[in-house]
């Protein structure tokens, strides 16, 4: 195949056309719903300190005040929330985002993200909108929709309660489920839950349907609001199709003090694991203090959606030029 | 000691697991968007050939295995060991039956073989893909019978037995594909 020549694109013409159609359709979808398309900087002085996401950075003088570190965005979340706090109303963005060390069949360090925010939307309404968009972009208007709670998924499939299980119990479930080498892994509770989710549960999610998993343990809230109670839950959802994670949505955290506390926790964790230090984004925190309107937001991986649309097994098949040809 | 981080994992990388050298056959990166990343790998034990799965936490390091392949010339068998020589340094090295395995039946003096060394000692031996060997024993040939397509077993000088066309005689040389063990053609000389 001449497509193996490294100067050539990885994607074939069908994939290029599918991407163009997807972009045109999603823009029409949001235009009809009065959601404004915006752009925010790809290079930022600050980044999200989430320890599960490693930013790429470079050294440059972009402001005429001397060289300093600039981060390539891992998602446009923080600047988009600054827009919301400034009164933008509903907004969406299609952009390239970058995550170090993420490379595989379904991962590529540079990928395309669709992210949007809906002021005044309860999380359920945003899930409905995600379903409507995915059905339209895949031209599958009757694609069944399923909603599961994170806790029920673990209870029904693995017989454990993620809120109360100890790391030792989770390790033994991983071992009996045949995850090779589970016995030697050193993980905390969330690490074990991620292992079980990605190895035992995810492959079965979204088969012939669009599956929403919602209400996460508070330790996995990221930037979502936590509902207090006897069993607090993070108001967050993930979307799965064909055994693959497509999107992640939040009922957005509005409390600046709580956000600052979480960022500090992230930084402590980053330092403990020798990860690159990421200082808190003070401009984002100032925007939260000024007041973010109650809103729900979601980020959806466009390359993976294209994989689903085309039945592609590897993300490279839908990328114009993957990193090894870029 | 040399080691590899999980982001260096790829097919063919040689690593140590539980004291044995392994080669990575397949590496899959698995990561929930907001969670812990893992590398799920299929690895082949270079001693036993067995393929097993293993899951690593991304970012962890694994000891590198001191394994490399080199082309060595086969010299002779002393009844116990097969002796090979580096044709540049003239250094000699002996391989035991466990390392030579099935390759033994194709080894002919002076042929270049691919020898996999682990900590400097032979771990496995691959014969050349094509070898020229003399038939030492076979049923008498049917002269002129080049058309019927029948075959008969023939024992070669190294002890290997291959199916050859009916017209071939003991003393003739033939070319064999060692990967399939199949006769390819008559050969004039090695």
Image (cartoon, coloured by chain):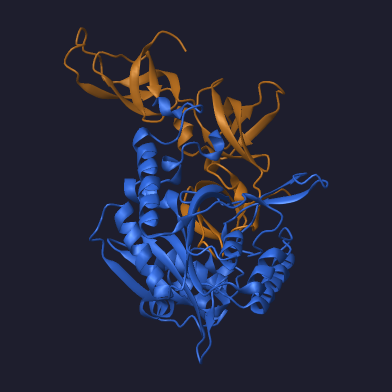
Chain colours: A blue, B orange
Residue A91: horizontal and vertical position, in percent? Answer: 49, 60
Determine the residue positioned at 70% across, 23% down. B90
- Left or right: where A154 falls relative to B118: left
Tell me if residue A267 comes above or below residue B110 in the rendering: below
Q: Quadrant of the C terminus of chain A?
A: top right
Tell me which corner region of the image, top left, top right, bottom left or bottom right, holds residue A51. bottom right
- Which residue is at the front of the view, A245 or A61? A61
Seen as rendered, the residue at the extreme right is A66
On-image quarter of the N terminus of chain A: top left
Instruction: Tell me, yes or no, if residue B158 can be seen here.
Output: yes
Does A242 sit left or right of A298 as displayed? left
Residue A326 position (above or below residue A265) = above
Compared to B189, does A131 lie above or below?
A: below
Residue B167 picture location, percent across and down = 25, 13
Please provide percent x and percent y for residue A176.
44, 73
Asked which quadrant contains residue A292, the reply is bottom right
Name the residue nearer the viewer: A112 or A24.
A24
Furthest residue in direction left, as rendered: B148
Q: Is residue B42 visible?
A: no
Residue A77 image point, x, y percent: 57, 61
In the image, residue A132 above or below residue B155: below
Q: A60 or A51, which is in the foreground?
A: A60
Q: Image point 30% across, 62% down: which residue?
A: A207
């Amino acid at each position: 195949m001449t497509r193996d020549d490294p100067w050539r694109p990885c994607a074939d013409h069908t994939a290029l056309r599918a991407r163009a159609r997807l972009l045109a359709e999603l823009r029409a979808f949001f235009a009809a719903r009065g959601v404004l398309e915006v752009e925010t900087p790809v290079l930022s002085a600050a980044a999200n300190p989430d320890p599960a996401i490693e930013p790429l950075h470079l050294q440059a003088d972009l402001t005429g005040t001397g060289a300093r570190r600039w981060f390539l965005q891992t998602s446009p979340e923080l600047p988009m929330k600054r827009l919301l706090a400034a009164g933008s109303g509903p907004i969406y963005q299609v952009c390239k985002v970058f995550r170090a060390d993420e490379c595989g069949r379904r991962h590529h360090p540079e990928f395309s993200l669709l992210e949007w925010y809906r002021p005044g939307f309860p999380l359920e309404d945003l899930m409905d909108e995600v379903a409507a968009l995915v059905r339209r972009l895949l031209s599958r208007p009757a694609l069944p929709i399923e909603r599961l709670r994170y806790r029920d998924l673990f209870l029904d499939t693995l017989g454990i309660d993620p809120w109360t299980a100890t790391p030792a119990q989770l390790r033994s479930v991983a071992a009996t489920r045949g995850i090779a080498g589970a016995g030697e892994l050193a993980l905390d509770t969330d690490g074990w839950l991620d292992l079980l989710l990605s190895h035992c549960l995810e492959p079965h999610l979204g088969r012939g349907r669009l599956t929403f998993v919602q209400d996460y343990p508070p330790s996995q809230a990221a930037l979502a609001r936590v509902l207090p109670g006897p069993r607090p839950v993070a108001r967050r959802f993930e979307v799965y199709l064909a055994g693959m994670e497509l999107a992640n949505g939040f009922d957005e955290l509005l409390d600046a003090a709580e956000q600052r506390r979480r960022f500090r926790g992230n930084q402590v964790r980053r330092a403990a694991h020798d990860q690159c230090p990421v200082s808190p984004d003070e401009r984002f925190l100032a925007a939260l203090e000024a007041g973010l309107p109650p809103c729900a937001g979601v980020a959806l991986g466009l390359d993976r959606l294209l994989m689903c649309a085309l039945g592609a097994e590897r993300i490279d098949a839908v990328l114009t030029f993957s990193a090894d040809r870029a | 000691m040399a080691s590899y981080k999980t982001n260096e994992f790829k097919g063919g990388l040689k690593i140590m697991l539980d004291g044995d050298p392994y080669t990575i056959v397949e590496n899959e990166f698995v990561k929930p968007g907001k969670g812990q990343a893992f590398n799920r790998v299929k690895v082949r034990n270079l001693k036993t050939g067995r393929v097993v799965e293993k899951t690593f936490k991304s970012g962890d390091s694994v000891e590198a295995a001191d394994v490399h392949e080199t082309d060595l010339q086969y010299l002779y068998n002393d009844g116990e060991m097969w002796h090979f020589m580096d044709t540049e340094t003239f250094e000699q090295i002996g391989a035991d039956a466990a390392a030579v395995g099935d390759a033994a039946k194709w080894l002919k003096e002076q042929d270049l073989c691919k020898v996999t060394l682990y900590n400097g000692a032979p771990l496995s031996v691959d014969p050349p893909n094509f070898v020229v060997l003399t038939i030492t024993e076979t049923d008498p040939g049917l002269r002129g019978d080049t058309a019927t397509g029948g075959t008969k077993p023939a024992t070669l000088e190294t002890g290997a037995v291959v199916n050859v066309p009916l017209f071939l005689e003991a003393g003739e040389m033939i070319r064999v594909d060692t990967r399939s063990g199949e006769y390819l053609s008559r050969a004039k000389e090695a």
